[in-house]
Amino acid sequence: MKTFEISEAIRPQDIISQLAVLLRISITHDISNDALLKSVHNFICIVDALLIKDNYLTVELRRQFFYVNDKRVKYNLQNYFYFQFLKNEFTKRNLGGLHMRSSLSVREVQTFITLFNAVASAEDPFSLLAGGLNEGESIIVSPLDMSVQKESQDAEKLVKKTYFSAVSQFKDFSKKIDDGEEVAIKNANFIIRAIVDRVIDEEQTLLSMTSIKNYDEYTFYHSVNVSILAVTIGSRLGLNRRELFELGISGFFHDVGKIKVPRQILNKPAKLDDTEWDVMRSHPAKGVGCLLSKKTFSRLAVRSAIVSFEHHMAKDASGYPRVSGNYNQDLYSKIISIADRFDAMTASRIYTKKPRSPEEAVAILSEGVGKNVDAALLRIFIDAVGIFPIGTVVLLDTRELAVVFRVNSVFLDRPQVVLVTDSKGNRVERRVIDLTEKDTGKHYTRSIKSTVDPSKFHINIVEFLFPTVSSKGSGVVES
Amino acid sequence: MSDAIEFENSGLETAGESLSGQSTSQERQVIALIVTLIRTLEKAKKIVRTYPSNNQTYKNAILDTHGKFSEYFALSCEEELVLQIEHNAILYKSTKVYSNDDLTDNLALFFFKDGVQTLIFEKNISTVELESFIKILGTDYTDDDTDVIGLLWERDFENIKYVTVEDLSFEDTNYEQKVFQAVNNNSDILRAYEEALNQPEHKEIQLATPSEDDVQLLLDEAQEAFNKKKEKLAEILFYTLMDATDPEEIQTIAEATMNLTIDFLNHKVLNGFLKMSSMIAELRLRSDMSTAVNLKLGWLHSFCISGETISRLGDIIDSEDIIDESILSKYVDCLDANSLRPFMALLDRLKTIRGRKRVVAILSKVGKKDVALIVEGLRDPRWYFVRNILCVLGQMNDQATGKNIVPMLRHSNARVRVEAIRALETLSLAEDTNLFHALHEIIKCLDDEDLMVRLSTLKTVSNLLMSHGSTHEDVRATVISKATTGDFLKLGMPEKKAYCDLLSRWNEAKVNEFMMRLLKKRFFLNRIGHIDNKIVAAYYFGLTGNKEVVQVLRQLKDSPHMLLRNEVEAALRKIESENV
C-alpha cells in the first residue's frame, strides 16, 4: 500500500521532513496505527525515490546541518521546524547518520522507530540503537561523533583566510573613505559572498573567529565580526543566499559613518563629554551619507543605509537617532543590532577597556527583549552562539578551567570546551571535551560552574581555539 | 554526425585550423557538438527571454539544450564539460568553440566582463538547473549590485561551477601573526583559575522559543518589496537632513534626497515621489530648521514642482491604475501657482481618460491660486484643451469665471459647447444669484445645430430648475413655445423625450392640450411619425401623471405597435399608481 504520490521530483529535504513527521507521530501513536502506517509508507516511497537516483542513501547530521548523500540540505521556513526536531532527536541519541542501501520494508521501518523511541532516555542510546538493529537490516546507523570528526583542517584554513581577507579589505575601504573616495559597496561583494559560504558550510569555525578581538584595529575586526554574526542569524532564520548577502554587506558597512567622526573623539581614552557624545551619536546618520554618494539606489546601498541609520535604535527610545513613535526598525537592522551589541560588549575598546564576557553579553541582550532586542531573533542568535559563546572562559564543576570551543544548539549550556587547566590549576595538554558526556550513573561528567574574564588575566583565547597556527598549540586531542 | 565539420558563420576559423592538423575524428565530433551546444544555448537564451515558461517553444528550448549536454557527455565520456572564457571567445581544451566580436550580444563577453574565467558543467546537470542558468544568460540587469557572478552564486547550482578572477588570494599572514603573537607571555592562568573558583555560579537565562508565526513575520519582513525599503530610506533622509549641521553633510543628504526623488520618478513609484514631495513641503513649514537646511528644502521643493518633474509625474499618473488619493491630495496641497502651467501642459499629452481626470482634479484644486491663468486656457486654439479647461473651471466652481465660460457656448466645437453648458450648470447649481443669467445663456443653445448640445441644454435646464425649485417664466415660455410648434414634431425621439422631461415639471395646460391632440390624432396609414408622436405624448402623460388622459390611453393599449403599446402601458401604470 503505497499512499504517497510522487507528483514531482523528490528533493533531499523531503526525507528530512518525512522522517521528522514519522518520528513525531510515533511518539503518540501505536506502531500499528493507520496514521503511522501511512507515514511509514510515505517515508519508504521517498527513500525508494532517492535510492533510484544514487543506489544508496545516507542521512547525516554534521555540525548542526543535515547532509543527504554528502550534500548539505538547505532548510527554509517550511521545513525549519522539522529540521530542528530531527536535529534534537538525533543529538539526544548521539545519532550521527542513517545509511540505507536497499529498499526498506514496513517491518524494518517499524523496528527502527520502536528502537528509536525506546532508547531515547537510555544511558548510551546510540549503542542500544545500533545493537538493536539486526545485521542484515537495510538501515544502518552511525554515531554523531563520526560526523563531527569530519571537520577538516583545510576548511579551517579557508575560514581563516576568509576572515583575515575581510578584515584586510575593510581596512582598505576605511582608508579610501578617509581619503575622500566614495564607498564602492560592490567591491565587497566577493568577500561577503565568501563569508556567506563559510557561514553555510563552517558556521561554528567562522563564529570562533569572531571571538578574536583586536584592540588596536577594533573597527575593522568589529565590522567583519558583525557581518559574520548577522549572516549566522539570517542563515538560521532561513533567509536565502541573496538576502544573506545583503545582510552581510549591511553588517560590513553598518559603522561606516564612524570614519567621518573625528579621530580625537573616536579614539579618546577618557570619557566623552556631552558634545563629543553628540558627535559620536551622529555616526549612523553620517553612514547614510557615505553609502548614498552615488546617484543610483541599488538594493545594497538602500539596505546598508537603512541599517547604518537604525542599528543603534531601540523601541524604548533609549537608542539613537531619535525618531517618531511609530517608526519600525527594519529586520536587517534588528539582526545587526544584536550582532553589533554582542561584539561591542565583548571587545575591549579605547573607552571600555574591560570587555564583558560573552556569557554576560548574552545575558544583557536577554534583558533587552521587548525594549531593544527582538525576542525571536535573540533566540535564534543564542541557538547559534550558545549561552556560553565560543571563547568564553569557564570553570567547570570539576574545578578545571576551559574555553568554549563549539556550541551545542540543542543543549545550549553544554558546549564543547578545550581544557586549559586541570583541577589544581595546572596547564594541561589541549583536549576537547563535550559537556554532554555522561558517566555510568547517567550524570554529566562535567558542567559549567562559572565564567572568568580572560582579558583580566591576559589569556588569549585564540591560543586555545586555533592551536594549529598558534606557536604554543600542540594539536587537538579529542576526548 | 559527420566528420566534416562546418564552421561557416560561426567565426571559428581558429578552431577549424587547429582541428585540421592533429585532431582525431572523435575529438572533431566533440568539438562540433560543443559548437552546436553553445549555439543552442544562445538560441535558448533568446527564447526564454521571449516566451512564457508554459509555452511549448520555451520548454523545447530547454529540452533541446539539455539534450545537447547529454550528447556531449555520451560522446566524450567525460564527467564534466569545462569551458574557458576569453574576452571574445570560449575555448574547449584550447580549441575555440565560440567567437564573437559583438559588444552587445556576446556570450563570452557576458561572462568575461564580470570576471568569470571558467565554466564547468557536470554530467548530472538537470533541466531545472539548465533552465535557471539560461535565465541568467537572458537577464537584463542594469543596477549596480548585480553581476553574473552574483547571479550564479545566488543560484548555488549543484552541477554548474565557475571559476572567477577574484579569489581568496589573501596570503598576508601579518594579521594572523598579530593575533596569535598577542598571546601574552605574562598570561596568568593560575590567577585566573583562582579567581574563577571565587566567582558566583552563572545564572540561568530564560529564553523564549520563537513560534512559527514569529519566524514567519520576520521572513515576511525580509521579503518586503524593495520600493517599501526605498520609501523608508526617504523617511531616513529627512530625519538625517533635519539633524544635519555640517554644510557638507547637508549638501550630501539633500543631493541624496533629490536623487531618490528622481529615482522614484524613473521607476514610476508614485507613492514614493508623492510622499517625498509632501514631506519636503511639510518640513518647509517648520520653524525649527536651520537656514542651511531650509535653503536645501526650498531647492528640493522647487524641483518637486518643476515643469520637468510634473511632466514625468504626468506619465505615471497616466499609466497607474490605482493611486492612493490621500497621498496625491497631500501632494496637491503643497503645490503653488507655479505648478499650474506644467500641469496644464499635461492636458495636451495624457493618453488615458483616468489620467486626464486626475490632472483636471489637481488643476481644479491648485487653479484657485491663479484663476486667471486657468481662464487664459480658454483662448487656446485646441478644442480638446479648451474642453479640459472648462472641466477644470466647472470643478473649481468659481462664480467669477461664469462670464468667461458663457462665450464658450458659442465655441465652434460642439463638445466644447457641451462642456461649457456642464460647467455653467455646476456653477449655477452652487449659487443661484447668477442662475437667471446663466439660464438665459444656456437656453439659447436649444437652437444649436448639434443634437448633443441641445440634449445637454435640456438636461441642464431641467436640473437647474429642479434644484432651485424656481419657475423662471422666460425660460418656461421659451421651452413651451418650442415644444408646441410643428418644428417639435420634426425632432428625433430622444430630444422629444428630453423636452417632455422638462415640460412635465410645469404640467402646463397649453402643453397638455398639444400632447392630447397628438395622442388623439387619427391617421389612416401607419406613418412612423404619427406613432412616434403618440409615444412621446404617452411618455409625457406618464411623467405628469395626468389622470384625465387615462381613457384615451386605454384606447391605445391594444395598439399593434409594440413601442406605443409599451409606452402607454407604462404611462397607465404610473398614473394609476400615483392616483392610488
Image (spheres, rainbow, N blue to C red):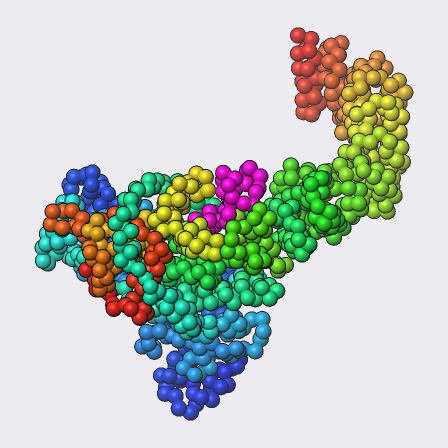
Outermost residue toward the bottom in this view: B21
In the image, is A4 to the left or to the right of A223? left
Q: Position of residue A130 (x, y in %)?
A: 13, 55
Q: Left or right of B411: which side holds B524?
A: left
Q: In this view, does A454 lie above or below B537?
A: below
How many numbered discs?
A: 0
In front: B435, or B410? B435
What is the x, y in percent for residue B483?
85, 23
Relative placement, left or right, of B141 versus B94 is right
Q: Which residue is drawn at 43% across and 83% down?
A: B94
Which contiguous range is marked in magenta? Answer: A311-338
Q: Please identify the quadrant where the C terminus of chain A is shown.
A: bottom left
Q: Nearer the viewer, residue B503 or B487?
A: B503
Q: Residue at x 12, y 54 (%)?
A: A127
* Residue A415 sits above or below residue B285 on the image: below
Decide if residue B174 is in sight here: yes
Magenta-drawn stretch contains A334: yes
* Residue under the point 74% across and 42% down: B335
Q: In which quarter of the image is residue B415?
A: top right
Q: Which residue is drawn at 52% across and 81% down?
A: B11
Tell me where residue B320 appears, x and y as whole percent: 63, 45
Residue B568 magenta-highlighted: no
Please name the predominant secondary structure of the magenta segment in the image. Answer: loop
Q: Is residue B336 above or below residue B543?
A: below
Give the camera-side residue of B116 and B361. Answer: B116
Q: What percent of the width, then of the height, locates residue A148? A: 24, 60
Mark yes or no: residue A240 visible. no
